């Protein structure tokens, strides 16, 4: 894997496919549509050599007029979920994350979900200055996956799980889909047996930190 010193200037970009009314599909149909019609992208950049473990992680992203949809597929050696309440420490578990720049001003949003669907969501002005979503907003972040919403601590190579989330553009302050978004996709597990911090678009910082909009890549919404 490349380190941040090798790829510090390599911000990524991708095209996000339009699928009309995708957010209206049921869970099973939505997952099938993403599998069949949307290309997979790898979350595989190891930015910090102190944390070399790299589980296999892919994501698919699509949008409609009203929402953006992200699905993650993960294969790793320790599947952990302790956080059961929203806005808890999900990053310590087997966790996937979508960070997106505020499309109508300063700051950014972070959507973090552990392997059993517990979510953290917030608007942030910085890493330490955040407005977490209340219950009403959190209920509008639809998520579903392959594991039940219950604690898990499972070890062994080749364990697989997936998680999908549907985020209305209205939660980002938009009335409809924009032409572009600045974003990054992550996989982490701070308290997994092998601590890891993977990103899609590289991060050129000395210490692990996902709260870095300067290194967000570009999503081009078709």
Image: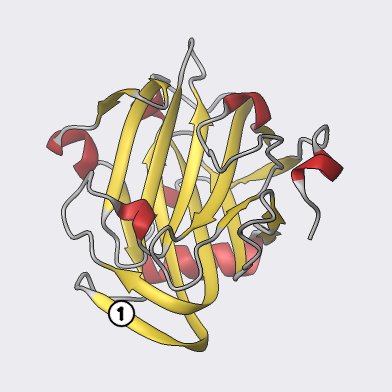
Q: Give the residue at the far top of this rendering.
A: 105
Could you say where residue 179 lies in the image, as x and y percent from the top left? 64, 25
Front-lying residue, 90 or 220? 90
Q: Camera-side residue: 58 or 152?
A: 152
Query: Residue at coordinates 29% horizontally, 61% vertically from top-left?
Result: 117
Please state if 152 lies on the left or on the right of 218 as rendered: left
How was this image coloured? Answer: secondary structure
Q: Quadrant of the N terminus?
A: bottom right
Residue 218, image x, y percentages: 69, 32
Quadrant containing the C terminus is: top right
Q: Is residue 112 above or below residue 190?
A: above
Residue drawn where x is 27% and y is 77% of the image: 152
Which residue position holds label 1? 153
Q: Is mark 1 on a helix, strand or loop?
A: strand
Q: Position of residue 99 (x, y in %)?
A: 50, 37
With respect to residue 206, does 24 lie above or below?
A: below
Q: How many marks?
A: 1
Give the residue at x 62% y 68%: 53
Where is 199 relative to 11, above or below?
Answer: below
Camera-side residue: 24 or 119?
A: 119
* Dot 1 alpha-carbon crowd within 10 angstroms: few under 14, some 14 to 19, many 20 or more: few
Q: Residue 8's quadrant in the figure?
A: top right
State left or right for residue 211 relative to residue 6: left
Q: Can residue 24 be seen in this view?
A: no
Percent coordinates x, y for residue 109 in the rendering: 42, 29
Q: Which residue is drawn at 31% across and 24% down?
A: 130
* Residue at the right extreme, as displayed: 6
Q: Is residue 141 visible?
A: yes
């Amino acid at each position: 894997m490349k380190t941040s010193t090798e790829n510090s200037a390599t911000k990524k970009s991708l095209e996000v496919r339009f699928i009309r009314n995708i957010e209206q599909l049921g869970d099973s149909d939505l997952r099938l549509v993403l599998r069949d019609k949307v290309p997979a992208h790898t979350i595989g950049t190891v930015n910090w050599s102190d944390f070399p473990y790299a589980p296999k992680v892919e994501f698919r992203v699509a949008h409609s007029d009203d929402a953006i949809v992200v699905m993650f597929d993960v294969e790793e050696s320790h599947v952990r979920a302790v956080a059961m309440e929203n806005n808890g420490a999900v990053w310590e578990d087997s966790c996937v994350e979508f960070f997106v720049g505020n499309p109508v001003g300063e700051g950014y949003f972070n959507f973090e979900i552990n392997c059993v669907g517990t979510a953290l969501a917030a608007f942030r002005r910085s890493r330490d200055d955040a407005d977490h979503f209340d219950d009403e907003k959190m209920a509008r972040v639809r998520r579903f996956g392959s594991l039940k919403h219950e604690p898990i601590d499972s070890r062994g190579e080749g364990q697989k799980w997936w998680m999908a989330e549907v985020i209305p553009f209205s939660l980002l302050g938009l009335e409809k889909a924009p032409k572009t978004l600045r974003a990054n996709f992550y996989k982490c597990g701070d308290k997994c047996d092998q601590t890891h911090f993977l990103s899609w678009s590289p991060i050129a910082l000395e210490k692990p930190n996902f709260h870095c909009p300067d290194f967000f890549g570009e999503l081009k919404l078709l």
